Image (spheres, helix red, strand yellow):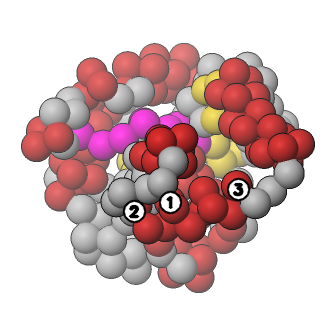
């Protein structure tokens, strides 16, 4: 894509580096930004800088937050006896939208995927095991995507927790095999949570 301005080209390159945004979409967005006032563009770009500087991971569950402890972990009305294990924040947003779950979460930050070079040490698994040992929850819910990588991660965690005398459950298969959790509709996901079942190897 030959553009008449190197600055325009560089902006398109930067925007198209984001997942799901191609060069044509990036150009359309950049041209929109170009037509805005300098004040609007400054406010727009500054919001990203502030986000990068201030957003952090919750010390307990690894969710994203503006504070040391996220709003879910610090909420006394949440059921601390249940921890739902998810891949990332998008899964928390999907589950919260169902209004069917009132426990806590733990964000792994991914799933085990040897093909992508992601192993257990690359995820928030050690902090999860330490947390479980300290808080001693009654139940752990595996709420990872119903994919081969998700099942591999479930199996790994099950082996680590099998001797802990904690009830280990997983979502019922209302969530389609091969589907990512964040794309499940709210009704299906809510039912899968309510009808969760014991995890078996």
The residue at 24%/62% (across/down) is: 147
Return the residue at label 3: 33
Q: Are marks 3 and 1 in contact (CB under 8 Å)?
A: no
Q: Residues within 10 Å of mark 2 (few under 14, many from 20)?
A: some
Q: Earlier in the sequence, mark 3 or mark 1?
A: 1
Q: Main secondary structure of the magenta part?
A: loop
The residue at 50%/60% (across/down) is: 26
- The residues tagged by marks 3 and 2 sit, at their Cα atoms, a distance apart of 16 Å
**At numbered mark 2, what does the secondary structure look like: helix, strand or loop?**
loop
Horizontal side of 149 relative to 87 (left or right) equals left
Q: Are marks 1 and 2 in contact (CB under 8 Å)?
A: yes
Return the residue at label 1: 26
The image position of residue 133, as x and y in percent, is 47, 19
Return the residue at label 2: 22
Q: Is residue 162 visible?
A: no
Q: Residues within 10 Å of mark 3 (few under 14, many from 20)?
A: some
- The residues tagged by marks 1 and 2 sit, at their Cα atoms, a distance apart of 6 Å
- The residues tagged by marks 3 and 1 sit, at their Cα atoms, a distance apart of 11 Å
In the image, 127 versus 182, the foreground residue is 182
Q: Earlier in the sequence, mark 3 or mark 2?
A: 2
Quadrant of residue 197 in the image? bottom left
Q: Are marks 3 and 2 in contact (CB under 8 Å)?
A: no
The residues colored magenta run: 105-112
**Up/down of 126 relative to 192, above or below:** above
In the image, 50 versus 64, the foreground residue is 50
Q: Is residue 62 visible?
A: yes
């Amino acid at each position: 894509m030959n553009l008449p301005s190197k600055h325009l080209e560089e902006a398109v390159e930067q925007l198209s580096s984001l997942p799901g945004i191609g060069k044509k979409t990036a150009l359309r967005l950049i041209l929109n930004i170009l037509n805005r006032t300098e004040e609007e563009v400054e406010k727009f770009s500054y919001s990203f800088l502030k986000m990068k500087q201030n957003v952090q991971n919750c010390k307990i569950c690894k969710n994203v937050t503006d504070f040391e402890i996220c709003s879910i972990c610090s909420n006394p009305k949440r059921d601390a006896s249940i921890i739902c294990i998810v891949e990332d924040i998008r899964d928390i947003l999907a589950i919260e939208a169902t209004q069917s779950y009132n426990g806590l979460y733990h964000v792994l930050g991914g799933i085990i995927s040897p093909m992508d070079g992601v192993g257990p040490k690359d995820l928030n698994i050690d902090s999860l095991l330490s947390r479980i040992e300290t808080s001693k929850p009654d139940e752990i819910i595996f709420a990872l995507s119903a994919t081969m990588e998700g099942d591999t991660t479930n199996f790994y965690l099950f082996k680590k927790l099998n001797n802990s005398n904690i009830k280990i459950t997983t979502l019922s298969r209302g969530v389609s095999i091969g589907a990512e959790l964040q794309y499940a509709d709210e009704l299906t996901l809510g039912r899968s949570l309510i009808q969760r079942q014991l995890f078996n190897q």
